[in-house]
Image: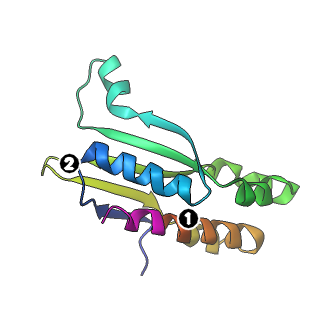
């Protein structure tokens, strides 16, 4: 049975992992539309957590397929794709992402094709930090 979320330990430290992923994502023709620094957000609210950054990714050629048709726009809440980079108390850095292909398989059609392709490419990004 496939997992809904995947987690991979990085071969790099936190900052190197974020940098390596960013470079790989951009070189593959994707965009990093935003990076949420959740550690900083928590700090601003007087909480301390280990480093966590959530990277929002977009490949316009995929996105348009979900945004141009009325039937597919419903699934825009799953956009953009996200990859999370975080440290754990064991001192290692990890990367996680949702298996959007698995989710989209239950939807079918254009959504399944687009989200499966996006997930497959995201797995290539993850390989860059192993």
Residue 81 x, y percent position in the rendering? 57, 53
Q: Residue at x 12, y 52 (%)?
A: 90
Label at residue 100: 1
Residue 42 is situated, as x and y percent measured from the top left of the image, at 33, 26
Of residues 105 and 117, which is closer to you in this image?
Answer: 117
Camera-nearest residue between 49 and 71: 49
49 left or right of 2? left
Q: Residue 66: name its quadrant.
A: bottom right
- Looking at the rendering, the stretch of residues picked out in magenta corresponds to 124-130
| Callout count | 2
Q: Which mark is residue 88?
A: 2
Residue 119 in percent (x, y) is at: 55, 67
Q: Secondary structure at mark 2?
A: loop
Residue furthest to the bottom: 1
Name the residue located 33 percent from the left edge and 40 percent from the top edge.
52
Which mark is on residue 129?
Answer: none
Q: Nearer the viewer, residue 55 or 21?
A: 21
Q: Is residue 125 magenta?
A: yes
Report whether 29 appears left or right of 46: right
Q: Residues within 10 Å of mark 1 (few under 14, many from 20)?
A: many
Q: Residue at x 34, y 26 (%)?
A: 40
- Quadrant, the C terminus: bottom left
Q: Is residue 113 left or right of residue 16?
A: right
Secondary structure category for the residue under label 1: helix
Q: Is residue 122 above or below residue 94?
A: below
């Amino acid at each position: 049975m496939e997992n809904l979320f995947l987690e991979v330990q990085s071969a790099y430290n936190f900052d190197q992992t974020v940098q390596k992923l960013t470079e790989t994502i951009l070189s593959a023709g994707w965009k990093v539309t935003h990076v949420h620094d959740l550690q900083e957000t928590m700090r601003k609210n007087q909480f301390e957590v280990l480093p966590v950054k959530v990277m929002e990714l977009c490949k316009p050629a995929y996105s348009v397929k979900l945004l141009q048709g009325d039937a597919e726009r419903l699934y825009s809440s799953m956009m953009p794709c996200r990859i999370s980079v975080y440290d754990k108390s064991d001192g290692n850095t990890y990367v996680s992402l949702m298996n959007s292909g698995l989710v989209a398989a239950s939807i079918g059609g254009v959504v399944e094709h687009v989200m499966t392709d996006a997930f497959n490419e995201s797995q290539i990004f993850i390989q860059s930090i192993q």
